[in-house]
Amino acid sequence: MSYITLNTSKLHHNYNYLNQLFEEHHIEWAVVAKLLCGNEKFLKCLLKICGREVCDSRLTNLRHIKEISAKTQTVYIKPPAKRLAESIVKYADVSFNTELETIKALSEEAINQKKIHKIVIMVEMGELREGIMAKNLPQFYGEAKKIPNIEIVGIGTNLNCLNGILPDEKKLIKLNRFKEITEEIHQTKIPFISAGSSVTIPLIFKDKIPEGINHFRVGETLFFGTDVYNDSVISGMYQDVFKLTAEIIEIVEKPMIPAGDAGTNLTGEIPQHDERKKGRTSFRAIVDVGILDVDIRHIEPLSSGIEIIGASSDMMILDLATNDRDYHVGDTIDFSMNYMAVLRAMNSEYIDKVVEHKINARQFKILENSN
């Protein structure tokens, strides 16, 4: 069976890198764990490294986190459905909100459960996903503040996830100004502005984070060492915390061009082929993973000389050319993975999950020299 490996040593290194960065700039941060899809084995590894505050957008995942580490502060990072109010209060210490009626439902449940439920008010800053309009923040805050057993611990915003709108200093200054206006009107103090995510991290390097922005929510950069803003990587961080491994179940020298009349394939496409390869052969390997388990557009073979030809629901076809590495049935092939590839693999019950603790000594030396 194919499997995905989590290297905890590399994950720990990335966490320490980010933690030092945020500490130097007096910013608190929480890990966004939704990529792990609630997998108990991987969550235990993550919580050993960073168990203080963890965010997710799935209640079942937050429940798993609480079962593993009851002391971890859990944050539900999308506007809750009213019907889920009981479970939100039970498993999420904090939730992101944009609707007063939902906050009232959370209040009723908090009273029933004898809890104070914390909320962050999400503010629209151009991405057109969740968030109240910024001009309405003072009034909304005033109404929410009256609701019993609800504690407003911050305001926040989301950028880049839907329309790709990038954060900038001007937007963050504007958000901070609305917070200050709200504080002045209501003679109160709002502890946090949770306006940072992986895409905002590069602004730290440029010293373009306004002082009032004091909380980040980070997932992708922690797990992949990516500079999301510039579509690149951050020097000094690992990009290969995850790795996919698949086993060869067939290897045969075959023609490079299929024969016969072609219709649409499983995904509704008509594959195109280079007719210049007609009459030529190469070694084709089939591995035990398919599009049900991973998006083949988001993985790459780690060994040179291997090309992904295509995949059906549960098999992937590789071109090994002349098979210079002498692969045989039963051998395995490793693949790098990006965020979307890991997300689908983690959501597949057909992919085993494996934990690895070691860092290759040569890789560690290269990484240290890059700092």
Image (cartoon, rainbow, N blue to C red):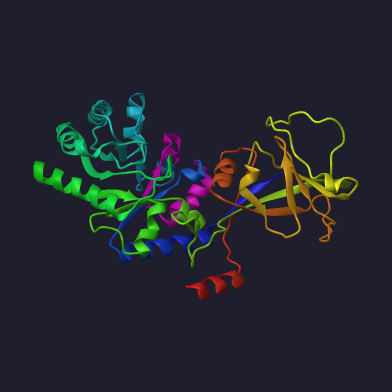
Above/below status of 32 relative to 222: above
Magenta range is: 38-64
Residue drawn at (31%, 38%) of the image: 96
Which corner quadrant holds the N terminus?
A: top right
**Rendered image quadrant of residue 81:** top left
Residue drawn at (65%, 36%) of the image: 292
> Which residue is at the front of the view, 49 or 323?
323
* Image spot of residue 161 (x, y percent): 43, 43
Instruction: Name the residue furthest top.
Output: 83
Visible residue check, residue 251: no
In the rendered structure, the answer to whether residue 241 lies left or right of residue 322 reads left
* Image spot of residue 166 (x, y percent): 39, 49
**Rendered image quadrant of residue 157:** top left
**Rendered image quadrant of residue 18:** bottom left
Q: Per the image, is 337 magenta? A: no
* Image spot of residue 109 (x, y percent): 27, 28
Residue drawn at (30%, 36%) of the image: 131
Q: Per the image, is 58 magenta? A: yes
Residue drawn at (23%, 44%) of the image: 153
Visible residue check, residue 319: yes
In the rendered structure, the answer to whether residue 33 lies left or right of residue 86 reads right
Above/below status of 17 relative to 47: below
In the rendered structure, the answer to whether residue 235 lies left or right of residue 251 reads left
